[in-house]
C-alpha cells in the first residue's frame, strides 16, 4: 500500500467518527480571553473549544481577528470559514493541526466590503474534508511554509474574488475521497505561486497535466524558480507538480518565462 492510500484509509476512519457525532452547530471566534488561541474555550461564542462545529472566524465581529492553532493542538471542525462581515481575519497553524470532516475550508468568505481571509500554515498539518477554497467571495490568501495538506475534493482559487495560494514548502495532496475525484480550479482572479526555494509540491488527482499547462500559459500558476515540472510516474494515478530551476529528464513537462515571454519546453511523459 503506497503512502497516499494509507492516508486515505485513515481519513475514512476519521470521517465515520464525525458523521456519527450529531448535529452540526456554529462556533464564532471572538477571542474574549485576548490570548488569540484556538484551544481556549472562552474564545468561542458557545464557550467551548470546537469539535464538530461550523467554525467562523470574523462572523459578527467588530474588529479584525487572529486565531492560532499552536504546537501539539488538534483543531477540529465540520467546516472553517476565515474572513466575514467586512473584517480582515487570519488563522495561523503553528505546529498544530486542523481537520474538517465532510466540508470545506474557505479562506475569504463574505462579499462584505473590506472582507479578507488569511491562512498561514507555518508548520503542521491540515485535512480538508471537501473543498479548499481561497478567494471564494471575499479576498483570500493561503501561505504554506511547510507541513502537509490533504484535500478530499477540489482545490479552488480565485473564482469569486482575488485568491492567492503561496505554496512555499510542504506537500498538498488531493485525495479525491469526497466524490471519487478532485480538480484544480483557478479563476480569473486566482494565482497559485510556487514560491521560495522550491520546496513546495502539489499532488493532484488523476491526469491534470493539460490543466496545469493551461494555467501556466495564462499566468495563473507561477514559479519563483522559473520552471514547473509535472510528473505522472512518482505517484501513479496522480499528477505531481513542483517547481524546478533547471530542465528535468524526459518524463517531465517544463515551463519557463524568459524576458517576459513564455516558453514551454515539452518532454515525452511516460504513463504508469
Image: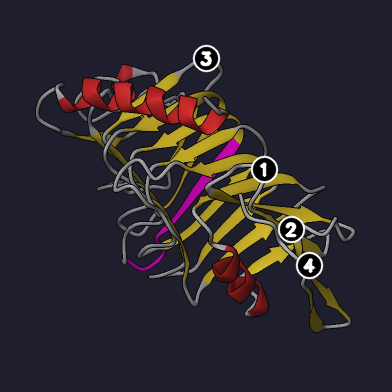
Counting residues from the start of the chain, the first of labels 3 and 1 encountered is: 3
Q: Which residue is mark 2?
A: 229
Question: How far is mark 1 from mark 2, CA to CA?
Answer: 12 Å
**Residue 31: quarter of image:** top left
Q: Residue at x 71, y 61 (%)?
A: 269
Q: Which residue is mark 1?
A: 234
Q: Secondary structure at mark 2?
A: strand
Expressed as whole percent of the image width and height from the top left, the position of residue 268 reads 75, 66
Expressed as whole percent of the image width and height from the top left, the position of residue 74 reads 43, 19
Q: Which residue is mark 3?
A: 72
Relative to residue 62, is residue 139 depicted above or below?
A: below
Counting residues from the start of the chain, the first of labels 1 and 4 encountered is: 1
Q: Secondary structure at mark 4?
A: loop
Which residue range is magenta in the image? Answer: 112-121
3 or 2: mark nearer the eye: 2
Q: Which residue is mark 4?
A: 267
3 or 1: mark nearer the eye: 1
Label 3 crowding class (10 Å Cα cut-off): few <14, some 14-19, many 20+? few
Question: How far is mark 4 from mark 3, CA to CA?
Answer: 43 Å
Question: How far is mark 1 from mark 4, CA to CA?
Answer: 16 Å
Amino acid at each position: 500500500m503506497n503512502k497516499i492510500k494509507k492516508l486515505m484509509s485513515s481519513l475514512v476512519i476519521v470521517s465515520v467518527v464525525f458523521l456519527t457525532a450529531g448535529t452540526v452547530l456554529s462556533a464564532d471566534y471572538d477571542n474574549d480571553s485576548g490570548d488569540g488561541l484556538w484551544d481556549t474555550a472562552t474564545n468561542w461564542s458557545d464557550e467551548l473549544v470546537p469539535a464538530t462545529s461550523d467554525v467562523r472566524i470574523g462572523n459578527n465581529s467588530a474588529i479584525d481577528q487572529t486565531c492560532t492553532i499552536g504546537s501539539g493542538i488538534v483543531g477540529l471542525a465540520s467546516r472553517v470559514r476565515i474572513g466575514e462581515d467586512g473584517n480582515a481575519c487570519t488563522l495561523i497553524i503553528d505546529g498544530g493541526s486542523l481537520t474538517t470532516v465532510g466540508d470545506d475550508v474557505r479562506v475569504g468568505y463574505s462579499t462584505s466590503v473590506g472582507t479578507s481571509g488569511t491562512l498561514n500554515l507555518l508548520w503542521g498539518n491540515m485535512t480538508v474534508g471537501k473543498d479548499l477554497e481561497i478567494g471564494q467571495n471575499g479576498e483570500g490568501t493561503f501561505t504554506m511554509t511547510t507541513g502537509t495538506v490533504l484535500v478530499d475534493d477540489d482545490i479552488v482559487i480565485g473564482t469569486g474574488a482575488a485568491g492567492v495560494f503561496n505554496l512555499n514548502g510542504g506537500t498538498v495532496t488531493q485525495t479525491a475521497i469526497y466524490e471519487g475525484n478532485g480538480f484544480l480550479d483557478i479563476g480569473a482572479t486566482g494565482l497559485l505561486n510556487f514560491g521560495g526555494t522550491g520546496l513546495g509540491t502539489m499532488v493532484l488527482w488523476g491526469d491534470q497535466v493539460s490543466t496545469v499547462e493551461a494555467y501556466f500559459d495564462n499566468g495563473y500558476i507561477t514559479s519563483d524558480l522559473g520552471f514547473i515540472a509535472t510528473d505522472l510516474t512518482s505517484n501513479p494515478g496522480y499528477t505531481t507538480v513542483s517547481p524546478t530551476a533547471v530542465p528535468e529528464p524526459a518524463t517531465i513537462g517544463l515551463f519557463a518565462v524568459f524576458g517576459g515571454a513564455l516558453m514551454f519546453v515539452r518532454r515525452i511523459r511516460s504513463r504508469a
